[in-house]
Image: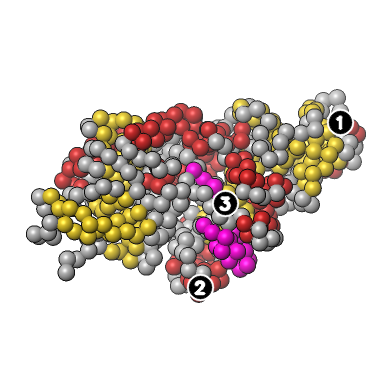
Amino acid sequence: MTQTAFPSWPDSAPKLIEVAAGRAPADTVIRQGRWVNVHTREVLDGHDIAIVAGRIAYVGPDASYCTGPETEVIEANGRFMVPGLCDAHMHIESGMLTPAEFARAVIPHGTTSMFTDPHEIANVLGLDGVRMMHDEALMQPVNIFTQMPSCAPSAPGLETTGYEITAEDVAEAMTWPGIIGLGEMMNFPGVANADPKMLAEIAATQRAGKTVGGHYASPDLGPDFAAYVAGGPADDHEGTCEADAIARVRQGMRSMMRLGSAWYDVESQITAVTEKGLDPRNFILCTDDCHSGTLVHDGHMNRVVRHAIACGCDPVIALQMATINTATHFGLERELGSITPGRRADVILTSDLRELPIELVIARGQIVAENGSITVECPHYDWPESATGTVHLGHALSAGDFELKAPEGANSVTANVIGVVENQAPTKALKAELPVVEGLVEGSGEVCQIALVERHQATGGVTNAFVSGFGYQGSMAMASTVAHDSHHMIVVGTDREQMALAANRLAEVGGGITLFRDGEELALVELPIAGLMSSSPATEVAAKAQKMVEAMEACGCKLNNAYMQHSLLALVVIPELRISDLGLVDVRTFKKIPVLEPIS
């Protein structure tokens, strides 16, 4: 593995001092820009930045005294000089890209620091998969910090993963150079009930002096929430309303407000700052999950900052939430997150602080993107065969595997149905009266079938249930090996024959997403690495993903970012109903429930 060597501040201090004192020339000087100072919430006209050894040596009105004949001079021409943007909580795998290709996609958008939780690959490949992600992250020309996944499985006893993460795994990972803390602690009932395994993982992280990520997905802000906070998680990104954000910051947590491809939780929470007037220092912006289409067409953290500003946030406060607040939270305030001496020279030049066009991106003192185009290489890890052959069905599936038999003699049944909610991670627990045809329960109207197909251990297991909200029509099925967090295979369809075709196709290509209608494959996104990622460029993956969106629309689906909704239907830590390889799960009670209500 080739890691990008980057000297520490103490190692760089002699050079920084010499340049700041005018005794040595800077490597680079950015001249006459408007300095966005996120420490003081000021915009200061007519300032220069002097850079040496990838770090900032001087910021002030005139860096000519440390400019030599070999110094590269970049004319800001009055543009705003903004710290490189930080994504405080994200999953690279959600972009369907490897860390290298994700970096290549987001660098032109001004993202220079990412705090990533690779718990998707942890569920498929365990600690080895985490190490692969960690190692490729360290090879990139920007800062990609890894949070060691905490919950694989996310809800023990309610799902089966390819691998389990142990407290010993967490303790080992805390010694790795790129590990910044513990990934989101999704097993919030476990923490609230003092589960020894969860507490051991938290303790290993705290002993290493690192940050424990949170994930409290319950609307209950009573004793369980208090117990969860007392257990150690330092932040939370699962809030969906103003009251959630306020509750978290009042208890000393950071409220991470997300705008991903399908999560629109900034507007409903940022009023805690813009209207209630709470101190913004404890509010942070993040994406959580962004697919490749969003990255290519809409942006990354620049999109989130623009959105926060459009929701009424002061531009500099919004930038604080995407720079210094994030760095401070992870104990890196002296390393990044601002344009000040000693920090990594991560700088954006933009002509408009509200619309935030990203015109020049500098990371660690190097120009990495200009006017939307990347100017550096993002090295790839040599992914082994163990990371590619990960779809094991046990046998070729048929329509019979997707049958759900009705009670003897029933003409109709009452079913518990997963209700998809547009633009939100939570689902609704619905009930529907469904017809019985020749002894089998059929979908009806908005309700279609969903199946969870086991793909890690080749058990041949298929769990069948029902889902509502996609609006599919005709004879179709969509299958995906991206199925947060256990990452088995989710198949949603209106026809059992099509469901079998889609599932078998993904086994054939080694993972990804496919959609069949009337026996024809309308779209395919190949994701051969762990069934989650492609090493192809984001533009290519996004083009295939766009065809998938169009295929879903052709089958009647009108939901915004419906694929993200599809991929989360197995996430058994977010209310209300989810599906797993063990059955239908009511996340409000963390218990399995029957798909069909008993006939009285």
Residues 71 and 132: in front is 71
- Residue 47: x %, y % from top left: 84, 38
Query: Quick one: label 2, few (<14), some, or many (20+) residues within 10 Å?
Result: few
Of the two numbered discs 3 and 1 in the rendering, the one whose residue sits closer to the viewer = 3
User: Horizontal and vertical percent for residue 444?
Assistant: 23, 49
Secondary structure type for disc 2: loop
Which numbered disc, 2 or 3, marks the residue closer to the eye?
3
The amino acid sitting under disc 2 is Gly
Q: Which residue is disc 3 drawn over?
A: 266
- At mark 3, the secondary structure is loop
The residue identified by callout 2 is 222
Residue under label 1, please give it: 67
Pick whichever of labels 2 and 1 is earlier in the sequence.
1
- The mark that comes first in sequence, 2 or 3, is 2
Residue at position x 39%, y 35% from top?
Answer: 549
Other residues around mark 3 within 10 Å, as few (<14) / some (14–19) / many (≥20): many
Q: In the picture, which quadrant includes the N terminus?
A: top right
